[in-house]
Image (cartoon, rainbow, N blue to C red):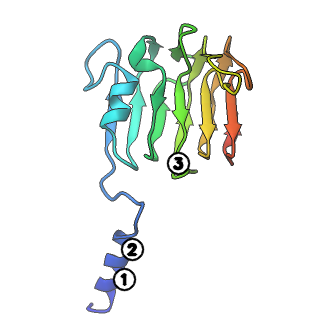
Amino acid sequence: MRLCMPIVLAVLLVPGTSILAVIHEVNMHGGAPFESIGEAVAAASDGDTVLVWPGVYVGANNREIDFGSKNLRLESAGGQSQTTIDCGFEGRALVLSDPAIDYRTVISGFSFYNGYAWSSPEDGGGAIVCYQASPIIEYCYFAYCSGTFGGAIKLLYSDAIIRY
């Protein structure tokens, strides 16, 4: 028994892992702790999940959402046909720009509409920009997103995985 305990402790104390991951629910209609995606992402810690209930998410707290250095799972509860982030041509939805963001960050099951990234000649990724970040982006739909480089997604120094 004494030999097993140090091994278990070593496994539980590996840097960059979360033992107590939390699910932060977002529902624009109320009934959840958060009504905007940005508020839930800001409250989340590395390894947490932000679960977004069906609806069309608009407004300042639902665009230009920066994960910082946190690896999060941003997931739609209803899938891309029921959960939309509409940027209203006022910016992009997600900014992932920290090298600490890797395959542990997953964006799953959203429709992204009307993303806009034209503020500078280097700008791009009307819906999502990944600069030195390498998340997994899966089961997402993009429409009417535009940018100087990369209409929907701009990957720069990124090993992101995109799958449908």
Percent x, y of residue 65: 46, 28
User: What amino acid is found at the position of numbered circle 1 in the picture?
Assistant: Ile
User: What amino acid is found at the position of numbered circle 2 in the picture?
Assistant: Val
| Secondary structure type for disc 3 | loop
Instruction: Give above or below for 24 relative to 84.
Output: below
In the rendered image, which residue does mark 3 sit on?
101
Left or right relative to 136: residue 83: left
Q: Which of the numbered marks, if any, corresponds to residue 40?
A: none
Percent x, y of residue 139: 63, 31
Which residue corresponds to the image point at 39% horizontal and 73% vertical from the top-left?
Answer: 11
Marks 2/3: CA distance?
A: 21 Å
Labels 3 and 1 touching (C-beta < 8 A): no
In the rendered image, which residue does mark 2 sit on?
11
Labels 2 and 1 touching (C-beta < 8 A): yes
Instruction: Give above or below for 88 relative to 46.
Output: above
Q: Which of the numbered marks, if any, corresponds to residue 7?
A: 1
Q: In which quarter of the image is residue 117?
A: top right
Q: In which quarter of the image is residue 113?
A: top right
